[in-house]
Amino acid sequence: PPAPPKPLWPKPPWEWLQLVFTYAYAALLLGLYYSGACPAIPQSGAYIVGISVIAIVGGTLRFIFGDLESLRRRRHPVPMLLVGITNCAGFAFTILGLVIVPANFGFFGDSGGPDTCELTPMIALTIPFAFICLGCVCCLTVPCLVTALMCCGVIKLDDFVSSEESTATSDEDADQMEAGDNEDST
């Protein structure tokens, strides 16, 4: 027979500490983001607020009910559903972060302009992205990372082609376009 689930209360000190760190993480993200302006990335506010809300809700559920396995053993369907929804929302915001953060790394060098992002919101956007990258060490092989950066537009395929080949290809394309223009004018 399976071991009986451990009691939910009293909580050990490390669970209290984990809850405090979770709330501090959410407060840090919100504080950093809203201490500056980021008009260049309209989705950034939704990303930071979403990640913070998911951290608070997920951390609270984990603190109150324990992990998902203890929820299954105790047969609490509503908290299990809430944990599942929180995990799905976390996955969605992770994908959003993978799309908007690497594509906007250029704002680190151009922070503070009227149509860019200030430094503190960019740091707030980068912290969850860094946790995703550090937590996904198994996925960070070179091909996987390059593919993700290519999809985000950070790395272009021309970066992998030598300059002579790129020049030759662009010259051929220009010749073909000129030939097409000459045919249209006659």
Image: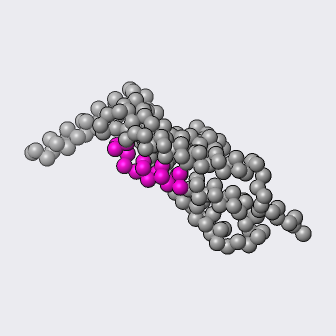
Q: Does the magenta stretch include residue 62?
A: no
Quarter placement of the C terminus: top left
| Any part of residue 143 in sight | no
Q: Which of 137 and 50 is in front in this view?
A: 50
Residue under the image location 54 percent in, 60 percent down:
89
In the image, residue 54 above or below residue 112: below
Q: Give the range drawn in magenta.
A: 38-53
Most extreme residue toward the front, as rendered? 10
Quarter placement of the N terminus: bottom right
Residue under the image location 25 percent in, 36 percent down:
174
In the image, residue 64 above or below residue 133: below
Residue under the image location 69 percent in, 61 percent down:
64
Spot occupied by residue 59 in the image (x, y as percentages of width and height):
63, 55
Q: How many marks do you count on the picture? A: 0
Q: Which of 30 and 91 is in front in this view?
A: 30
**Seen in the image, is 138 located left or right of residue 110?**
right
Most extreme residue toward the top, as rendered? 164
Q: Which of 92 and 166 is in front in this view?
A: 92
Most extreme residue toward the left, as rendered? 186
**Seen in the image, is 12 located left or right of residue 48?**
right
Q: Is residue 39 magenta?
A: yes
* Colour scheme: one colour
Q: Is the magenta stretch mostly helix, strand or loop?
A: helix
Q: Nearer the viewer, residue 90 or 27?
A: 27
**Seen in the image, is 89 located left or right of residue 99?**
right
**Seen in the image, is 153 located left or right of residue 179?**
right
Spot occupied by residue 39 in the image (x, y as percentages of width and height):
34, 44
Spot occupied by residue 163 in the image (x, y as percentages of width and height):
39, 27
